[in-house]
Amino acid sequence: MRVQKWLISKNSVNFLLKSKYVTILGSRLSSSDASKNVITAIYVDSEGNPSSEDPFDKQSKLSDQVKGSVKSFLKEKRVQIKPGTSKVLSWPSDVMPYKSISLAAVSKDNLNDPLVDLKREQIRLAYSSSIRTLSTMKETEVVVDSVGGQQQGEMGAVSEGCHLAAYNFDMYKAAKYKKPVMNLELLDESCAGRGDWMEGFVLADCQNMARTLTEMPSNLLTPEKFVEEVVNLFEQQKGDSEVELEIKIREEAWLREQQMNALLAVAQGSSQKPYLLELHLTHPKADKGVQPLVLVGKGVTFDSGGISIKPSKLMDVMRGDMGGAACVAATALGALRLNVCGRVVCLMGLVENMPSGDSFKPGDVIFSRSGHSIQVDNTDAEGRLVLADLLDYSEVWQPSAVVDVATLTLAVEVALGAAFTGVFTTTNKLFDLLRKSGSSTGDQVWRLPLSPLFTRQVSNSPLADLNNSPGLRGGGACTAAAFLSHFVKCPSWAHLDIGGVFENKNEVQYLSKGMSGRPTRTLIQFCRNYFSP
């Protein structure tokens, strides 16, 4: 076992520090205002007609002259901008002090929805629309005007929309094919919403970290490289936080001592060594009477399916089968940067699932850390084996709650599409906190059933205590959750199946196509709500 420090070779590259946007703090950019592009909110009705009184936010820092010019133009041209979209306006430099003004359209009416904060979500959409348009125009200097005249915390949504949309993954492309880095700054650094802006930046930046990890090809992000990248990043961040951080890297010998045979079975077909990465976060003011929250992440850095091999079509997407571990690492980073006042333990099991002469096989029986014997009927149902040992190990801390995150099934995508993360939980309290967190971030969750029916199905095995894949039609996500429940001793447990949300196929408009990093922002907010309900 290695603790605290990971020795990085001089030739190691920390990819995660190559940001695709820059948030400027303190001093203003040196370039003149004429080279900058301003994004400002404009309030419209449901048809996209600007408010007849003053369409600008009360907190806007644009000059009266600029506002007057824009209002006259909108009225004269009868411009309509649908809520959640944007329009870029340009004038000659002798008329307007900025290169362009992007109008991010937000509904002037109250928006009510019991599941999600629609106003904040509309703000994310509108500002991300502005960012995407400016990116297409190859603009790099962007100034963001203040909002907050209608509701507190709106600048956080502005920041999330901007920074999530400004992200792109092109680190392996030649310079001539890379998109230019976008510089984002506030029009008024002393505005009342600056704190919210920075909080939104942290939430988006952590999700973008998860996107980067999940997007990286598996030959460059093996289990060992995952550990190296994450530890390197945390070592550079931890000095800026009140939260105490301890890092433990568990290697194969330790895993064998712990009899984590289910996790090791998945790894045995690959030449890449398995790891368990532990992150322990403790705030000095944390309530010592509250046991830690344990987050568990599935980290299969590539899933070929093993002997039960997957079809070749879209198999490359399985580089993202460590999306659960990426989200847990990013959530830990968010808890560190936002000084979450509690104790959090993060466990990430890191393996590859490959076919070879050493692979585990259909029909094998594995003895897990918990003592349960498991009949393997499908080596492509490997994630639940990795999680089984980790969930059993989590009991070492006698946690107040356990939450696992995994790209576990495609069945959850069939049930929920990309709209929701599927949640299976033993307590209403955990789900209520997750639902509240998803409402705030716009990245929502939906509860699915834990039922004795599914528990009986995974217990129906001729060779062992449990079957990792009963092979029954229907309820695939439910049987996977029922399997995991056998390894959980903590009465407060939630399983998040992110199989339908880890990749974005343009369903979420403020995320580019590719790995999504979802539901990182919701998990960070959940940690905050858990310790400060």
Image (cartoon, rainbow, N blue to C red):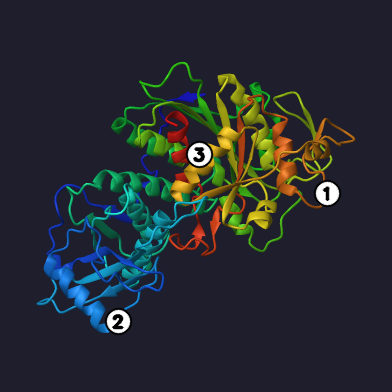
Residue found at the very far left of the displayed protein: 94
Above or below, comparing residue 163 to residue 258 in the picture:
below
Q: Residue at x 33, y 36 (%)?
A: 237
Dot 3 crowding, Cα within 10 Å, few <14, some 14–19, many 20+: many
Q: Position of residue 246 (x, y in %)?
A: 42, 25
Residue under pointer 2: 78
Q: Residue at x 49, y 42 (%)?
A: 436
The residue that disc 1 covers is: 472
Q: Count the numbered circles shown.
A: 3
Q: Earlier in the sequence, mark 2 or mark 1?
A: 2
Residue 405 image offset from top left, x and y in percent: 58, 41
Frontmost of labels 3 and 1 is 1
Residue drawn at (19%, 71%) of the image: 99
Query: Could you give the CA–CA distance between mark 2 and mark 1, rounded to whole angstroms?
Result: 59 Å
Quadrant where the C terminus is found in the figure = top left
Side (left or right) of 431 relative to 3: right
Amino acid of disc 1? Leu
In this image, 503 relative to 106: left or right? right
| Picture quadrant where residue 223 is located | top right
Of label 2 and label 3, which has the lower sequence position? 2
Q: Secondary structure at mark 1?
A: loop
Residue identified by numbered label 3: 328
Say the numbered circle drawn on residue 449. none
Q: CA–CA distance between discs 3 and 1?
A: 31 Å
